[in-house]
Image: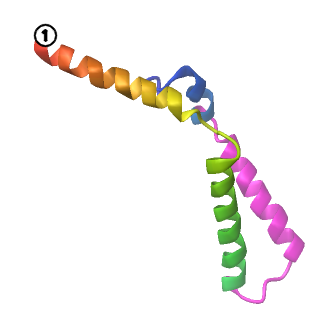
Amino acid sequence: MLHFPASHRLFLRTNNALERFNQEIKRRTRVVRIFPNEESCLRLVSAMCAETSEEWMTNRRFLDMDALREMFEDTRQEAPKLAAVS
């Protein structure tokens, strides 16, 4: 985990996003109260998963991928140097 950029470490060491998502599932299923069958519950939760995934990918940036790309590019550039020294 220490290999990731400093801006990512806080988000990776906590599970707040997952806990928040589970709370939202609980809240929305309580509104319905009684599902007619298992498939209807699965449909609701699947729709929530798709909605959350789309929101994370488009609207808000949970992790800045540019910082991660820069880190990987730096390590790729250093790898040939390390191989030449050995």
In which quadrant of the rendered view does residue 83 lie? top left
Q: Position of residue 85 (x, y in %)?
A: 13, 10
Q: Which residue is mark 1?
A: 85
Main SS of residues in magenta: helix
Reply above or below: 30 against 61: below
Reply above or below: 38 against 76: below
Q: At 29% from the left edge and 25% from the top edge, which residue is drawn?
A: 76
Q: At 84% from the left edge and 82% from the top edge, which residue is drawn?
A: 34
Q: Position of residue 32 (x, y in %)?
A: 86, 76
User: Is residue 66 shown left or right of residue 54?
Assistant: left
User: What amino acid does circle 1 point to?
Assistant: Val
User: Is residue 74 shown left or right of residue 32?
Assistant: left
The residue sitting at the bottom extreme is 36
Residue 34 belongs to magenta span: yes
Magenta span of residues: 13-38
Let me know if residue 10 appears in the view.
yes
In which quadrant of the rendered view does residue 80 lie? top left
Q: At 75% from the left edge and 49% from the top edge, which residue is drawn?
A: 20
Dot 1: few (<14), some (14–19), or many (≥20) neighbours within 10 Å? few
Reply above or below: 72 against 49: above
Q: Position of residue 39 (x, y in %)?
A: 66, 84
Count of numbered marks = 1
Closest to the observer: 67 or 5? 67
Closest to the observer: 74 or 2? 74
- Image quarter where the C terminus lies is top left
Reply above or below: 83 against 56: above
